[in-house]
Image (cartoon, grey):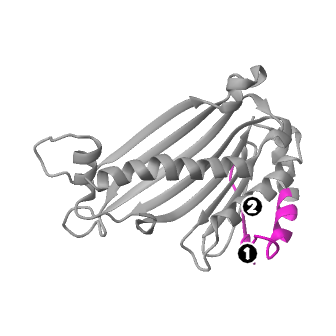
Amino acid sequence: MDDTWKLERLIFGLRHVRTFAVSGKLGEIVDLVIPLQGFGHFPSDCFSKVLRNVDALTIEMKDEEDTMSLKCGVDGVILECDMQAEPLIPQDAVCGMFDEVAQKVVSMTEAKSKINRLGVVFKYTISPFGNSAQELFTNLLKMDLKGTPDNIHIRMALKNPAKDALYHPDKKADYQNAIIEVSSEREDDKKAGFPTKMHVSVDYQMYYEPTRTLGDIDIRAHFNSAGSYIESSVKMSVLNFQLK
């Protein structure tokens, strides 16, 4: 089954209450991040380009091929990686890079005590047999609308209390949120024929209410939890209707 699931992109994000003091430290953030290149999990020249948004509230660092991007700003930190780019980077290495950057950057301001969300997004491409839109219509939605399915895009959001919220009164408002998107795609939009590829995106989020300090956030544990959820729930659900 895993051979048909190709991980295209992996995105990590840590959000905090908007903190404008970060905008005054964007230069310091660049000076802090650039030396990480070529050490540990970080590839050489992964942050060779530096771009500052026109609103001056966000700084972006990325490589020449746009296969890796790091955004730091008044709302948080986001790391995005192309998982098909050469040389291939292991998922665990991307998690390690994000963890290190977040610990260094967020701790520079009072944002470190105002964390309100942690998320990781997995974007897959699946190449099922036949018409991917047809498979989604007939097997997932159980619908027959008297036509040949040509395109489909489904978005689902699932919200559950976080485990900590069940045992700790001070964390009773914490919750997990999983946003799952499934869509069909043609190999070439310019050519006729039914779609043969399927995209699956899983955005696995943890919301903290009240806000947390950076020291209370376990990025690697959240990443592992997201992976377990995809393997045990998302992939098995899609596999079940693929086999029907």
Name the residue rendered at 83%, 42% in the picture: 214
Q: Reply above or below: 221 against 7.
A: above
Residue 160, image quadrant: top right
Crowding around mark 1 (Cα neighbors within 10 Å: few <14, some 14 to 19, many 20+) is some
Point out the tag, 2 or 1, that comes first from the N-terminus: 1
Q: Nearer the viewer, residue 54 or 117?
A: 117
Q: What's the mark number on residue 43? A: 1
Q: Residue at the location (57% across, 75% down)? A: 85
Front disc: 2 or 1: 2
11 falls in the magenta region: no
The answer to which of 76 and 162 lies nearer the viewer is 162
In the image, residue 130 above or below residue 155:
below
Q: Which residues are drawn in magenta?
A: 29-56
> Residue 28 appears at what percent x and percent y?
88, 57
The residue under the point 65% across, 52% down is 224
**In the picture provided, is 213 more to the left or to the right than 208?**
right
Q: Is residue 36 magenta?
A: yes
Disc 2/disc 1 C-alpha distance (Å): 12 Å
Residue corresponding to mark 2: 96
Q: Is residue 56 visible?
A: no
Q: Kindly identify the residue that appears in the image at 59 percent across and 48 percent down.
A: 226
- Count of number-bearing discs: 2
